[in-house]
Image (cartoon, helix red, strand yellow):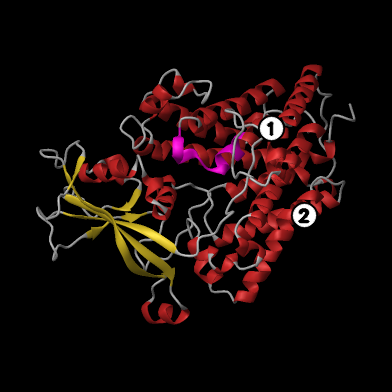
Amino acid sequence: MDWFAASDYWLSRLVLQRALAVVYLVAFLSAASQFRALIGTRGLTPVPRFVRRVPFRASPSLFQWRYSDRLFSCVSWGGAALSAAVAAGAADAVPLWASMAMWALLWLAYLSIVNVGQLWYSFGWESLLLEAGFLAIFLGNARTAPPVLVLWLLRWLAFRLEFGAGLIKWRGDRCWRELTCLDYHHETQPMPGPLSWFFHRLPKPLHRVEVAANHVAQLVVPFGLLLPQPVATYAAAVVIVTQLWLVLSGNFSWLNWLTIVIALAAVDSSAFAGAPPPVADPPLWYVVVVCAVTALVLVLSQWPVRNMISRGQQMNASFNSLHLVNTYGAFGSVTRVRHEIVVEGTDEEEPGEDTVWREYEFRGKPGDVSRMPRQFAPYHLRLDWQMWFAALSPAYAAGWFEPFVARLLEGDRDTLRLLRHDPFPGEPPRHVRALLYRYRFTTRQERRETGDWWHRTLVREFMPPVRAASGSHGQSGAGERREES
């Protein structure tokens, strides 16, 4: 079946699948290490409470039928183990049906997590991983040639991902059209990386070049992904280089790496891959399934296409509860000023003007002005990202920030594991408060004189001092706001 098989793409398929399995591995490890404090039985937004009010059809998940922290842990660690096995080649060592079953299990397990993850899993790269993971089920293994139709579906995904992101910028904040957004973005992005200070301090003319190049890469180049070879390979190369630039300039979880993985579907590897290995003709049932999935994706594509051509384009939206054929985009607006919430505690019985407050340090978000931003991507620090949103508006903190403070007052171990530093290792504090600061990168001169990466100025109180509920100091219990005289 020459029309069905793309034998020359065997190496592209191999690298794509192995790399996608590594992204799955990171995603499952992120879930396993953070879920107890965020969505566990005693989490900030518990899964049991969520599934009581959201029906299965709206959010299909294994955990709709039964939830326990132990079961969630088994699914997460089981998914990590299966991801590692697939990355090591296990799916290529078994029959086609078994390989498809492995990829289907990964997709179903992660879908179950995302659909009960609530705001902690509300990011576009979660849907992107599920959509790419769904297509990977039908990409075959070493015993079959890559299906042409699935490779085209992956190219279509890469096109929607890049072109949608370009459109949302061009239609959104005027600074994208004026080529000035990167005067701010490297400093105000959710999670700056080790090189973000240096990117921010580039001359402004270079920032204009960055923005213009981004427009070309996202509004023009994606059409090349849908053209014949070698144009598609050249377009994929531009996408890959652009994404590596973004990897260097910030921390966007696995978004950039997954975009690179998906773009590999457009790379013709025949020039350097050698002769394709011998494979058997695809079984008829496999051909029928791939054709059916292609038809399904084409039908579902009407919603993201309508969204892209709409003046009211949405960013990172799913049009069905299975996260199939989604719409993508990011930073339609760019903040000009960076605000950070600094959480502090004290062990004094009655805090006053002379009280010494000790600061909680987060793993990734800015806090200590002398600490160089760290590289965490592709790992996703979910609490740190939500803290960035909360600093934009208290509305983003509704429902989880006060429970977070209460866990600090209890000295909850699962919550403290999400932080870089616990300033109260022996006994939890008696009071916790939150302050809002304006953060900016230091100038070159300030950096030479102080060694600091950040400069911060107090803006206002974000949350007044809260104390542990009566009789609950060091135990489970809710916090109480302290009445100021």
Residue placed under numbered mark 1 in the picture: 135
On whether residue 128 falls in the magenta region, the answer is yes
Could you tell me if the residues under marks 2 and 1 are in contact, i.e. CB atoms within 8 Å?
no
Q: Is residue 443 magenta?
A: no
Evaluate whether residue 195 shows in this view: no
Name the mark on residue 35: none
Classify residue 66 as left or right of residue 404: right
Q: Depth check: 371 or 457 in front? A: 457
Instruction: Measuring from the top left, give residue 444's x and y in whole percent.
Output: 47, 79
Task: Read off the residue under disc 2.
Answer: 221
Q: What type is the residue that disc 1 sits on?
A: Leu
**Going 59% across and 51% down the picture, which residue do you hit?**
330
Q: Is residue 327 above or below residue 47?
A: below
Residue 208 in percent (x, y) is at: 65, 70
- In-front residue for pair 255/296: 296
Foreground mark, 2 or 1? 2
Query: For this rendering, which residue is in front, 470 or 275?
Result: 470
Label 1 element class: helix
User: x, y percentage for residue 50?
Assistant: 40, 28
Q: Is residue 294 above or below residue 249?
A: above
Q: Name the residue located 80 percent from the left edge and 40 percent from the top edge.
A: 9
Using a 10 Å C-alpha cutoff, classify the residue at mark 2 as few (fewer than 14 neighbours), some (14 to 19) or many (20 or more): many
Magenta residue span: 117-130
Q: Is residue 449 left or right of residue 176?
A: left
Is 447 located above or below residue 157 in the figure?
Answer: below
The amino acid at mark 2 is Val
Total residue callouts: 2
Check the picture and name the quadrant holding the C terminus. bottom left
Give the mark nearest the N terminus, 2 or 1: 1
Residue pictured at 57% horizontal, 54% vertical: 331
